[in-house]
Amino acid sequence: MKIRIISALVGLIVLAVAIAFYDTIIFNLFITALAVIAIYEAHHAAGLTQKHLRVTLYCALYAVLLLLVPQGREYSLPAVYVLVVLVFAYILEHHKEFTIREGAYALLMGIALPTVFGLFLLYRDKLGNEQGILYLAFLLGSAWWSDIGGYFTGMLCGKHKLCPEISPKKTVEGLLGGLVFAVLGNIGIMVLVNRLAAQGIGYLANPLTLHFGRICLLTPLLALLSVVGDLSFSIIKRTYGIKDYGNLMPGHGGVLDRFDSVLFIAPAVYFIALYLPIAF
């Protein structure tokens, strides 16, 4: 437990430093690094990096183009086309040991992961600094408050297993506790972000009007999506017989172990910002 807490605090400090450079290339570098590491972890879990590292490098280059190169997202469609051609060319070259199944998994992770991590940058580029940070906090809070609440509620009073064959430690009680904790946590963090904005701290220059009704209604839905994401990446670990995707954060695992619940929420938060905003 001590290692988990220290590791989490270090991770939060690194995240806070990255957000301090939110409107600079440093934040882009941070998000790109997360995406590249996540691709490596996903491919490594399936044994691809040991024998087929070239495919991982193709996907990593796609992530760099999408997230780090100026106007890289404008070339995402032709870049995906080139990536698909390269991976299928590799399948043809190594068809005896690199099958369509492995190629499809490599492409799924190579395209989906940088696309979703790219939404962290899209919040800023489309919504502006104040709302971008607010929705990023809403995103992370919906996943991580739910995870924290689910962990402690399940530990204290969890009796009914949620998905014992996929994630034996998750319980129905933990799920419900996580939903409540996520709502309370999100209300608190939204108020905090807005008070910082009222004081003109950093990029938070303009206070926003928060729609707390929508925050309370949407947070449980996002928290449920975070559980789906967590379980989805857990079943991948089960399939390939691994405990964690990596050991970047002792006690927490790798990037995918920490961000698996976030990945399924990020697109939903972007659509919320466009069509059902929580701040004006």
Image (cartoon, helix red, strand yellow):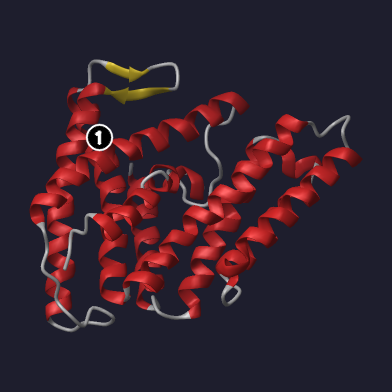
Q: Position of residue 144 (x, y in %)?
A: 30, 47
Quarter in which the N terminus is drawn: top left
| Along the viewing direction, whichever of 49 and 215 lies nearer the viewer | 215
The amino acid beneath tag 1 is: Gly
Q: Residue at x 39, y 51 (%)?
A: 267
Disc 1 secondary structure class: helix
In the image, residue 47 sits, relative to residue 119, either above or below, namely above
Q: Which residue is mark 1?
A: 150
Task: Count the labels in the image.
Answer: 1
In the image, residue 126 sits, relative to residue 243, either above or below, namely below
Q: Residue at x 20, y 24 (%)?
A: 173
Q: Position of residue 252 (x, y in %)?
A: 43, 44
Q: Which of the 4 image quadrants contains residue 178?
A: top left
Q: Which of the 4 image quadrants contains residue 219?
A: top left
**Label 1: how many Cα within 10 Å (few below 14, some 14–19, many 20+):** many
Image position of 154 (left or right of 262): left
| Along the viewing direction, whichever of 253 and 240 lies nearer the viewer | 240
Quarter in which the C terminus is drawn: bottom left
Q: Position of residue 86 (x, y in %)?
A: 80, 51
Q: Residue at x 45, y 81 (%)?
A: 24
Image position of 189 (left or right of 267): left
Image position of 199 (left or right of 3): left
Q: Position of residue 73 (x, y in %)?
A: 56, 67
In the image, residue 235 sits, relative to residue 199, either above or below, namely above
